[in-house]
Amino acid sequence: MERIKRYLRVLPVASLFLTAAAFIASPAAGQDLDAKRAQELTELGQKIDKAAERAAPEQVVDKIVGEFKGKSFTFDNGGTPRPLAESDVRALRQKLGFGEISILLALSNQSGKSVSDILAMRQSGEGWGELARDLKLKNLGSVIKSVKATEKGVDRVALQRSDRREDRLERAAKPDKPERMERPERPMRPEKPGR
């Protein structure tokens, strides 16, 4: 009976210790997760840029605009929210790669913050993880999902363009078919008697 009493006295202390350890470890684990998610965003942006090199720029712009169809963005502080237009993506393209544009728009869409505010934060040297934390985004999952969808769309466009390019190269490399030679007429055989 004495053992049980000792166990019951130690149990609350042990549970308090475990709870404190969980609170101490969870920010570190969360920071590690944020770093991994930020790295994943960076890699996705690089994939988009690499695929965009193989695709026509107009098609990449169309894919990015298509990804955010039906969503409104504020482009300037105090501006009126409006749908994303091709001209917006082209204007951002003067400063950023297509991958960064995709991430920027996804962050703006999730946070409700203006595109120019997020761009200023990025240009001040903040990484994607720091940006997400400053924007109070708890989960980068939806941002990553959006950027992945854009990456797949741009990759598809790039593959289609390279397939068409290869077809043109194959056709150019094949020599024209030689004209079909006509057969000389055969002389008629004489008929055999009895047939």
Image: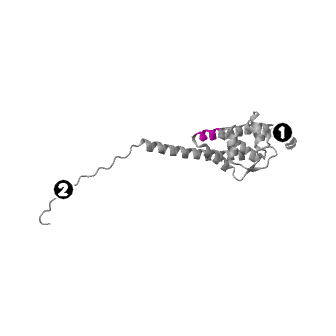
Q: Position of residue 121 (x, y in %)?
A: 77, 37
Q: Nearer the viewer, residue 42 or 91?
A: 91
Q: Which mark is residue 187?
A: 2
Count of marks, rendered view: 2
Magenta residue check for 33: no
Q: Residue at x 57, y 40 (%)?
A: 54
**Predominant secondary structure, magenta span:** helix
Q: Is residue 45 visible?
A: yes
Q: At 63% across and 39% down in the image, what residue appears? A: 49
**Viewer-closest of 178 and 1:** 178
Count neighbours of disc 2 (C-alpha within 10 A) and say few if under 14, some if 14 to 19, many if 20 or more: few
The one of 39 and 15 positioned closer to us in this rendering: 39
Q: Dot 1, crowdedness within 10 Å: few (<14), some or many (≥20)?
A: few
Judging from the image, what secondary structure is the residue with disc 2 in? loop
**Residue 47 part of the magenta segment:** yes
Disc with the residue nearer the chain's start (2 vs 1): 1
Determine which of the numbered discs, if any, sits on residue 20 in the image: 1
Image location of residue 149, percent across then percent down: 65, 47
Q: Amino acid at mark 2?
A: Pro
Q: Position of residue 167 (x, y in %)?
A: 48, 45
Span of residues in magenta = 46-53
